[in-house]
Image (spheres, rainbow, N blue to C red):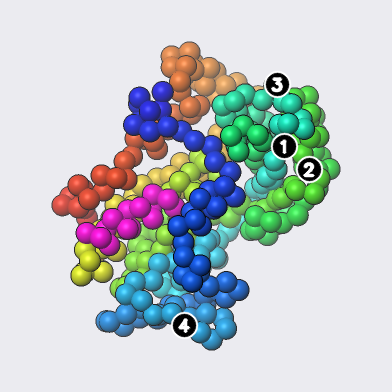
Amino acid sequence: MCRENFGADFHHVHRADLHAILCKDIAADHVRFNTVCTGVTQDAQSATAHFDDGSTFQADIIVGADGIHSAVRDSLWGADQASFTGHMCWRALVPVEQHPLPFVSPDASFWFGPKAHIVTYYVKGGAAVNIVAVNESADWVAESWTEPSTREELMAAYDGWHQNIIDLLQRTDPDQTFKWGLFDRDPMKQWAKGRATLLGDAAHPMLPFLSQGAAMALEDAFVLAEMIAHFPADHEAALKCYEAERLARTARVQLEARERGRTYHLSTPEEQRARDEALRKQQAENPNAVGIKAEWVYEYDATRCKERIGTMETVE
């Protein structure tokens, strides 16, 4: 139905597989390992990235795609710490061959509870189930995808949940369960300054409740490439049009993801019943609905961005 309604299929992709696909097209000498960008400087002719080992890299344009704690962002707009949202998230994989899971739907499934939820979906061509579990916690956790956790800690957070969830969590690899704290920022009013701009979480960190963080970064990258190709001799025009195309959309996704987290974690029986009844009604009206309405997320077509150049409002 996604192809019929939105022009393309809907895919669940494991991040490691996505990284492997992207790395195939990157020349080895274009990547510098074991160095950290500490900031950016620029003049009328070029921009320069500075690294913690004292080295520099000069280019026509610098794109800060360095995550939620972006040094490029801080260099352009001043330091601004992201705030802990009070949510903690676990990720884990369950190999289907070792642990058949007849109760896990081939589609993405959402399990809601008071101040917590779990999402499951198949990855690796159906060979594994990816688990994303979020609950509210006052304890601060590092914003890292590789913070080690334990199966026992994960199961303790969902003690008393439906037996299917307990059975699923019991199948997770105790040595491959990771957690991280969810951090957030309000949408920015501007990304680019001169010959430098931002992309992905550096520009618009997103809570995972709309499952669009990586998708927005991919859209960013495509649109940025299109604008640079369209304005090969005017780098600042390219960055302004890139930002004009992307800023409002990513801001809306940021805010909608934040609001959806509140909806997922309703804690009173009355609120939960009202939410669940609304979802049942929507599903009855449209069996292909993707939970809480989000058609606007999938209707966007990045490949048509250049058609909109003449109507863009750029920031001077």
Q: To which residue does mark 3 refer?
A: 102
Q: Quadrant of the N terminus?
A: top left
Q: Residue at x 28, y 55 (%)?
A: 226
In the rendered structure, which amino acid carries the disc numbered 4?
A: Thr
SS class, disc 1:
strand
Crowding at label 4, few (<14), some or many (≥20) Cα neighbours within 10 Å?
Answer: some
Q: To which residue does mark 2 refer?
A: 173
Mark-to-mark CA distance, 4 and 2:
42 Å
Q: Are marks 4 and 2 in contact (CB under 8 Å)?
A: no
Q: Are marks 1 and 4 in contact (CB under 8 Å)?
A: no
Task: Give coordinates of residue 219: x percent, y percent.
Answer: 38, 49
In the rendered structure, which amino acid carries the disc numbered 1?
A: Val
SS class, disc 4:
strand
First-in-chain label (3 vs 2): 3
SS class, disc 2:
loop
First-in-chain label (3 vs 4): 4
Mark-to-mark CA distance, 3 and 4:
54 Å
Q: Which residues are magenta?
A: 217-230
Q: To which residue does mark 4 refer?
A: 56
First-in-chain label (2 vs 1): 1
Task: Give coordinates of residue 24: x percent, y percent.
Answer: 49, 56
Q: Are marks 3 and 2 in contact (CB under 8 Å)?
A: no
Mark-to-mark CA distance, 1 and 3:
13 Å
Task: Give coordinates of residue 107: x percent, y percent.
Answer: 56, 26
Q: Residue furthest right?
A: 152
